Structure formats: C-alpha cells, structure tokens
Image (cartoon, helix red, strand yellow):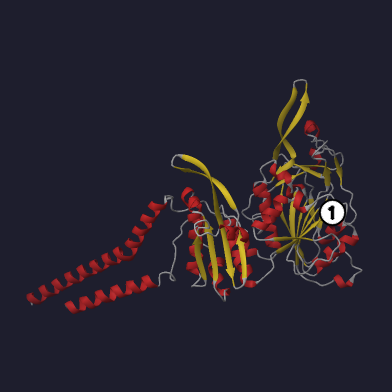
Amino acid sequence: MRKKEILIITLLSLLVFLMAFLVSGRLWFRLDMTRDRAYTISELSRNLYREITDRVTITYFVSPRLAVAHPMPGGVADLLSEYAAHSRGRIRFIQRDPAGTGLSAVVERLGILPWQIQVTERNETILATVYSGILIEYLDREEVIPLVFSLDTLEYDLSFRIRSLIRNTSRELGIITGDPHIDWYTDFSLLNHALVLSGFRPVIIEAGDRIPQSLPAVFVLGGIESLDEYYLRPIDEYIQAGGNVLFALNGVFVDSWGSFDARAAVDIGLLPMLANYGVLLRRALVLDSSSLSLTFQTQGTEGTQVQSVPYPPWIAVQGQGINQNHPVSSRALGPDFFWPSPLELHPPQGVNAEILFSTSREAWLQTDNFITNPNRISDFESERSLTRGIKILAASLSGIFPTAFPGDSVFQMNRHSRIIVAGDLNFAGPLMQTSGSEDRNLEFFIRSAVWLSGQDDLLDLRSRGSTGRLDRVTDAETRAVLMAFSRALNTFALPLIIIIIGFIVCKKRMSLKEKGGKNE
C-alpha cells in the first residue's frame, strides 16, 4: 500500500470519528444489564418524541449544596439527560441553581418547595435551605414536580406529566366523601398530598351532584349509611356513561378513638348497587393471623402500662394475597387494612372480576358479635373454626355494567367502565401512620387512580423503581475530573489508538509486500 493511500485512509478515519462525535448527541445509547433495566428509561418514555409537535423544556432547579451532599441530584440529572438524548431534539434539559441565579422567589411561586438539610461546612453543621424540583414547559402549558427527593417513581412522574401536556388531557380526579362527618382535606390529607405529588388534581364533588363525564375517574369514600337512591343515581349515571369509580367502604364501624365498640353499618342503598355491579360487601369483620401490632395503654395497679400485641383485625397483606397479574397490584407491596369487611364476587354477564388483595388461609370472620377491644383478644376467635379461609379484601371489575336503576332508560348507554371496591375505608385515612403503612397504602390509591384513568402503561413505570446510581462518586470536583477524563478517553484516545493500530497493520503489510517483491 502506497503512502498516499495510507494518508487517505487516515484522513477518512479521522473524518468518520469527527462526524460520529458531532452527531453523538442524537445517536446515543446506554448498555444497561441491571434487572428490569432500572437505569434506562422505558420504551414509553423513549417514544414520547413521536407525539411532540413543539419543543418540551425540562428545567431542574437544584441547589449545589444538595448536589454535593447527596448523590440523588446527579441521578436526576442523568435521567433527564436521557430523556433529552432519546427525544431527537424535541426535549431540552436545563439545570439551574435557584439561589445562584436569583430565581428563588420565582421558583417558589411556581410551586417548587424549599426544604432544609444538614450540611457540614468548615467543621460546622448547619441547616441549609435547598431546592430540588422540576418545571416542564410545552407551548403555553406547564407542569411542576414540587419536590424531587427520590428516583423511585421519577420516570412515572415525568412521563405522566409530559404526556398530559402534549395531549392536553385532564388529570383531575373526582372525590366524593359519602359520610357527612368526614372531610377530604382533614381526614384524608395524606392521600390528598400523595395524589397531588403523583400528578393528579383532586376535585371535590358534593354527593348528589352530577359528575362531569370529563373526569377520568372518581373516588367514593364511605357512604353506606348516608347515600340513598337520590345520591346514588349520579354515580350510576356516571358509570353507565363509561365513568370509572373506586369505592372504599366500611361494612362495620369501629370506635377507634374510644371504646373500640363495633357495629354493622346500616345500609340505605349503596350495597345493593354494588351487588348489582357484581360485588357483595358483607357487613362482617375479617381477622387474620397475618396481622399488624397494636400499641395501647392500660390502667392497672402499677399505673399506666403500654402494651404492643398482634392485632388480627389489622391485616398485613403478603405473598399469595397479592394478585401479580393485575396492573394495580402487580409487583406491589400489599397494603395494610384496618377492620376490613370481606367481599364476594358475582359478576354479571359482560363483566370481568378480579381479586386484587386477599388474606392468608388462616383468616376468619366475625359476623355477629363484634369484639375488637385489644383487651379481649382471647374472645376474637369465637367463629374461627367455622369461617376460616381466604377472604377477599379488594377487587376490580371491568366491562359493561347493568344499571342499578333500570326504570331510567337514559342510563342504558352500554359503555365500558372500570370499578375497584375495597372493603375498608380506614386504610385511606390517618390510621396508616400508626403502623408505618403510608407508602404501601398510598401506592395502592395512586395505582388505582392511574388504572381507572385508563393509563395502564404508566403503571409499569411505577413498578420499575430505582435502587440508586451506577456511579458512586459524589464529590463534585472528583466527578468533574473523571467526566473530563472519560470524554477525552472516548473522544480522542480510543480513536487515536485505533488509527495507530491501523497504521501499524498497514505498515507491516507494506513491508511484507516489499519483501515478497524482492524475493521474486
């Protein structure tokens, strides 16, 4: 091979590497060999660009102090960079320091919340106010993730909001509190906060009011003793028109803040309506050996004593009690239930019913004489031998439901709907804090809202989670040095090594050719 040919090959090689470098921002990939590809965004997220007609701008407002003290912001930036890399130029990622750019007041007006962390500076531990929130902008619309403190559901949070922006779809969730003595913002404040952080906007609907069909889903919390036909007709009409509803109901009421007296609920119409849809809620209590502990005080001769005992009416759903084949419960931790009532499924023709969560085989019922006082645990098992077995705690139904009020032909619309029924209202309220059940119980309601809204594909994103970051370098300077070294190695050193190897190979071939010519 002549010297001119070697020079041409060398120049062409350099040109190829240069062109590859220039388009590397668009032609980008990551080799992820972790289980469930935890460090790679899903196909759903990668394909969002197909629906984007204008540019989406994602701005991550994060304080440098937080980035230095914790690896989480680096992981967030990595994930957002991956969205931009896969978007073919339709998603732009920006990272800003609110305090350093004088945007703190603007950021807080957007809804991004400041929070405090302990940092050590010059051998002194101080409380520092930091930010970690995301603003997503598309056309004249915007969405905010007020507080990012984990990577576990961040991809869901991002894709849910981006897709809602580009499709301009409603993320409202109707709320009906069926009992007059309960208030959404007071009694269900934890659930309200969790739904807002997950991207939903709860909308309070007064019982008896018409439910807008624009709402993708509605939660009905309680109401066995207060919702009669007048109040139930709008719910049935909503379902007949294709609406989707979650019912969380107490079949037995327990005085949890006083004597622990329990009584069966007095139904005035809601239970027959559910039975018409295919779910029978029994006014009985479920108890299970797979239970939580209850801590309570007793007065004795030695004064006040604190006891903690296994409490069978508080049920921890585990293992076989979780339906791994349903989008709501698949790969989820089972919620904890507090004095639940059992369900029976008798779906009508055209309706598919599935169990979501159930008890262990060692569960039993109280059907008549309700004893829930922890001081009388020995009396809990009076019906155990007669009622032992698996009990259904929550179930889903989907299909075309028959109307509960057949005299009104206007309701017969024959549209597909989804329903979830849980035989417990307490597990949506403040009791979840007494046993550390918040994450499990709130996740159930968020997943239910997503499924009822018809966005099944997003449920996979909530299951992916994240166990941390691949790189463990948290020092900003060290990270910058290593990144610079990595860029230099991959951009210049490796191509140069390949060129040198190619030159050496060519040189050897030329030498062999020259020797062969002389021998001839």
- Out of 292 and 482, give the one closest to the viewer: 482
Identify the amino acid type marked 1.
Gly
The location of residue 252, given as percent across then percent down, is 83, 45
Residue at the spot 27% in from the left edge and 66% down from the top edge: 496
- Residue lying furthest top: 301
Asked whether, in this view, residue 419 is left or right of residue 76, the answer is right
Q: In this view, does 8 lie above or below 387?
A: below
Residue 55 sits in quarter: bottom right
Frontmost residue, 367 versus 220:
220
For residue 89, above or below residue 283: below
The residue pinned by badge 1 equals: 223
Specify few, some or many for label 1: CA neighbours under 10 Å numbering under 14, 14-19, or 20 or more. many
Q: What element carries label 1?
A: loop
Q: Quadrant of the C terminus?
A: bottom left
Between residue 204 and residue 232, name the one nearer to us: 204
Q: Is residue 42 left or right of residue 356?
A: left
Could you say where residue 241 lies in the image, as x and y percent from the top left?
80, 70
**Could you say where residue 286 lies in the image, as x and y percent from the top left?**
78, 44
